[in-house]
Amino acid sequence: MASPSVFAGIAQGPEDPILGVTVAYNKDPSPVKVNLGVGAYRTEEGKPLVLNVVKRAEQMLIHNESRVKEYLPITGLADFNKLSAKLIFGADSPAIQENRVATVQCLSGTGSLRVGGEFLARHYHERTIYIPQPTWGNHPKVFTLAGLTARSYRYYDPATRGLDFQGLLEDLSSAPSGAIVLLHACAHNPTGVDPTLEQWEQIRQLMRSKALLPFFDSAYQGFASGSLDKDAQSVRMFVADGGELLMAQSYAKNMGLYGERVGALSIVCGSADIAVKVESQLKLVIRPMYSNPPLHGASIVATILKDSAMFDEWTVELKAMADRIISMREQLFDALKIRETPGDWSHIIKQIGMFTFTGLNSEQVAFMRQEYHIYMTSRCHTCCSYKTEVNDNIATPSQ
């Protein structure tokens, strides 16, 4: 007879509100089921996509006889770090030219946020981070477990299904001087609602006037509008004024490297000397956490970014994905309009990026799942990268 487990008193943990949607979807035997909660791009056939340029890069790496499988440095692959900073800040960025950027390879966006959060908890005088309401479900947990206190600022207006810009400004105005502010660089998750450039400029002026520290999360560069430079405009506005900031990058979406867990944390500092010191402290955060990052995904990214022909091929594939998502939004909107679905659905084509905030309530989401096998998160955000007939099926229950 087995002895009692020392873990017998542990309670069953809840499913992740986002990943749990896929768990429920996989258990559903229905042949017409649709998973709109998955945070990954899908082809017209609803299948995962590996970019052609990624396949080419992997073949180049395989046939490179000089490649070895040694540990990377704590900070990661040097070429990857340098190229990642240039991609988000721009090759002509004064911060890069003046060596004021400390960049370390991390475990995709989540790892970059966590390393940045722990660094701030140890070395920054203010421990409060303001997070948009709503935001990606993992943000509050990442930062609180890193040692910061998370508070929210108004962002989304359910009445207009757009940006609550006045509420945002009021909440940031009342934040204590020096507080950290999390900003989505583009394609806000989960709402798909982004500030205009004019609004970004007002946000920048307010934050700099109150010495608020920007912490950008860039998970969708190039994946929102189809332009890498356009999707980095908000970040570059803050870098151009000479101030400091943190930047978490991920290549999960824009290169389709979801399972490679490849990302970067960059900290723009006041001087080159400070950047060197910041990097030394980031190494002390990383070493006991995961020692050093994985090689393969970073090698794929570096191979593509440093080869002009491959870079161009990537931008073409990236724009094709972004354009298709925009087209799917338009088709869903048209399908709802044709069926004379009650309400104003124009927010679907006004929002940007992979997700749309539908405006449905939790009861309606549950009804869609139970009656029509359409799965989305309880917060009512859906993935827009599905084929035309799926959009028709989604719209049909509203008849």
Image (cartoon, grey):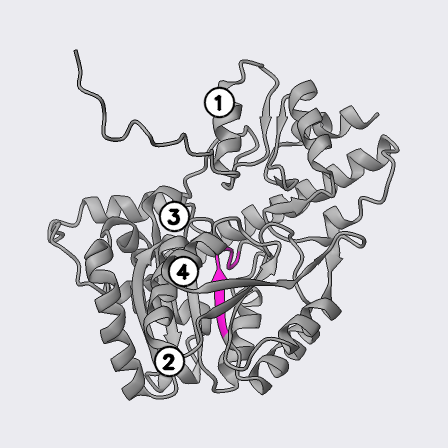
The CA span between labels 1 and 3 is 30 Å
* Residue at the (16%, 11%) spot, across then down: 1
Task: Tell whether 79 sits left or right of 195.
Answer: left
Which region of the structure is painted magenta?
214-222
Mark 4 element type? helix
Q: Nearer the viewer, mark 1 or mark 3?
A: 1
Location of the C terminus by quadrant is: top right
How far is mark 2 from mark 3, CA to CA? 27 Å
Say left or right for 84 vs 61. Answer: right
Residue 140 image offset from top left, x and y in percent: 49, 55
Label 2 amino acid?
Ile
Where is residue 274 shown, x and y percent of the image? Answer: 30, 85
Relative vertical location of residue 254 with respect to residue 123 in this rendering, above or below: above
| Residue 361 position in % (x across, y down) | 73, 38
Residue, disc 1? 26
Q: Is residue 221 magenta?
A: yes
Question: Which residue lies under the disc numbered 4?
Answer: 113
Displayed quadrant of residue 124 = bottom left
Q: Amino acid at mark 3?
A: Val
Q: Nearer the viewer, mark 3 or mark 4?
A: 4
Mark before the other along the chain sequence, 4 or 2: 2
Which amino acid, mark 4? Leu
